[in-house]
Image (spheres, helix red, strand yellow):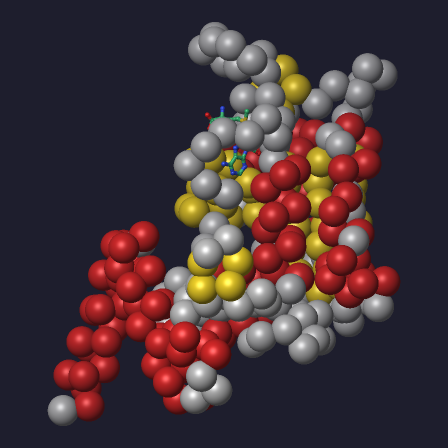
Amino acid sequence: MSWRATILTLFPEMFPGPLGLSLAGKALREGRWALEAMDIRGFATDRHRTVDDTPFGGGAGMVMRPDVLDAACEAATAANPDAPLVYLTPRGRLLDQALVRDLSAGPGVVVLCGRYEGVDQRVIEARNMVEVSAGDFVLSGGEPAALLLLDACIRLLPGVMGGAASAAEESHGAEGLLEYPHYTRPAEWQGRRVPDVLLSGHHAEVARWRRAEAEAATRARRPDLWDQFSRRMAEQQNTAK
Ligand code: SAM
């Protein structure tokens, strides 16, 4: 059975969107993953197909109703029974490559895309949703976050990346470093030369240079990742003693 993404959204026409193209689109056509976008409005029970209401306690905006969302979640989990239910929200844990790896190794994912001010808290708790944030910013809806979550998972599915470099060697890979910089032809462009070592043909030297660049970039750009990496290295050295 292929990896299955079930999306709960008020805008099912946003899917597959960009995921219908390039690597993800090819993998979708090859059946390496499957996609179903369910319209939350289809689970409303009144003749106006209402999915939201005003917030208790007052304040701006509207909140998505728990009864409508619960019915939508019921249908989505029936279609994708073993997949975790993710609610995309800026209040969630930050999406990172470790979570992406976990999700892509499983049977798939059910993703709830919020709109308005968000979702009634009770359905988040009742359905044991995993709350995940795409980053420390606020989108107008969960759909763009769902697209990026799915893209990150799909490229890790078996057979999707084909000949592309292994996922272990890229940024946020097994070692948790950022990747080294890349260069291609021409060897000189606008007075800027490609580092000599990359033209040397010495594989060991190239590997050493790339490793040093990866470490330098991580230290300079992401001190948080560098601290984690350094701690892991120290632990490994201690256990090796
Ligand atoms: N009132 C909410 C808050 O302050 O946390 C923001 C609501 S936002 C306008 C509407 C919907 O967009 C959210 O329910 C969520 O599904 C989605 N969303 C917004 N920012 C997001 C982010 N950084 N990551 C994931 N989803 C996000």
Q: Quadrant of residue 177?
A: bottom left
Q: What is the quadrant of the C terminus in the image? A: bottom left
Residue 116 visible to the viewer: yes
Write the residue at 71% across / 36% down.
Answer: 9
Image spot of residue 160 (x, y percent): 70, 70
Write the residue at 64% across / 55% down.
Answer: 151
Q: Is residue 215 left or right of residue 16?
A: left
Q: Is residue 122 left or right of residue 211?
A: right
Camera-side residue of 33 and 83: 33
Q: What is the residue that sits farthest to the bottom in this orientation?
A: 241
Image spot of residue 172 (x, y percent): 43, 64
Write the residue at 41% across / 70% down.
Answer: 195
Camera-side residue of 178 and 84: 178
Image spot of residue 175 (x, y percent): 37, 72
Q: Is residue 108 above or below residue 37?
A: below
Q: What is the residue that sits farthest to the front in this orientation?
A: 191
Q: Is residue 231 left or right of residue 164?
A: left
Image spot of residue 136 (x, y percent): 42, 36
Q: What is the quadrant of the N terminus in the image? A: bottom right
Q: Is residue 208 above or below residue 18?
A: below
Q: Is residue 133 above or below residue 30?
A: above
Write the residue at 73% across / 30% down.
Answer: 10
